[in-house]
Amino acid sequence: MANQNRDVSALRREYVASGLHKSELNSDPFEQFQTWFDQALEAHPDDATSMTLATADSEGRPAARIVLLKQFDRHGYCWFTDFRSEKGQHLAQNPYAEILFYWYGLERQVRIRGPVEQLDYNTGAHYFNERPVGSRISAAISHQSAPIDSRTTLESAVAQMREEHADGNIVCPETWGGYRLIPERFEFWQGRENRLHDRFSYELHDGQWQIIRLQP
């Protein structure tokens, strides 16, 4: 029954991973992320780049969705999307966000928070042109998040664009491109037995990263 109350409070899982100690952490959060990311990539390559992107509109109403990390370096963490999407509208109103990586097999989470900036058109176009033709067509014909009457309308638009651009030369729309989150705060979480998890934050103070152990 759709309206039947489902009590799932009895469901349990136990965390069995080894602990995370402050002495083992890199003093640089970018290096610490790189270490964990490489381990996640080795363990589960298909999911390592999946991240939850949390944004909020001008009135503070939140929204979260999964996007894929596409580039990262010391300047920040990047993804690509339609600027007209809900997340694009939120970031235009409130250019601040948080991304969350959850690596299930390793029982780890990483949260990264900070301001977000839009990447220049050439950067977006370069990545756009590296995508498969089907993905480029989908991005070009879709006004992401906007209502549409049916899937048939979408498929017709795809077929028309395939016919008009049989050579595969599809120009990146001005409405499509990348964003970069510039970290102000990191949090690394390691699951532990009995929910006594290890959590450490990296926070910027006077240009220096300070590591703080947090209660679980």
Image (cartoon, rainbow, N blue to C red):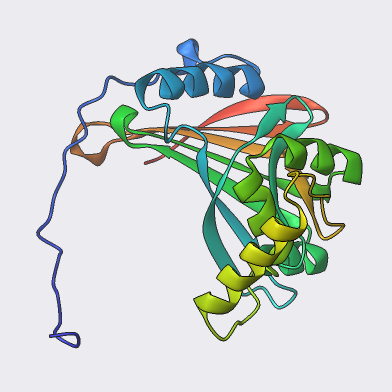
**In the figure, 46 relative to 35: above or below?**
below
**In the figure, 121 relative to 22: above or below?**
below
**In the figure, 44 relative to 111: above or below?**
above
Image quadrant containing the N terminus: bottom left
**Percent position (x, y) of residue 80?**
70, 47
Q: Nearer the viewer, residue 71 or 193?
A: 71
**In the figure, 37 relative to 124: above or below?**
above
Which quadrant of the structure image shows residue 212?
top right
Q: Residue furthest left?
A: 10
Q: Nearer the viewer, residue 14 or 72?
A: 72
Residue appearing at x 83%, y 30% in the figure: 206
Q: Nearer the viewer, residue 23 or 6?
A: 6
Residue 35 visible from this viewpoint: yes
Residue appearing at x 42%, y 24% in the figure: 40
Left or right: 44, with 3 as reference point? right
Residue appearing at x 32%, y 21% in the figure: 19
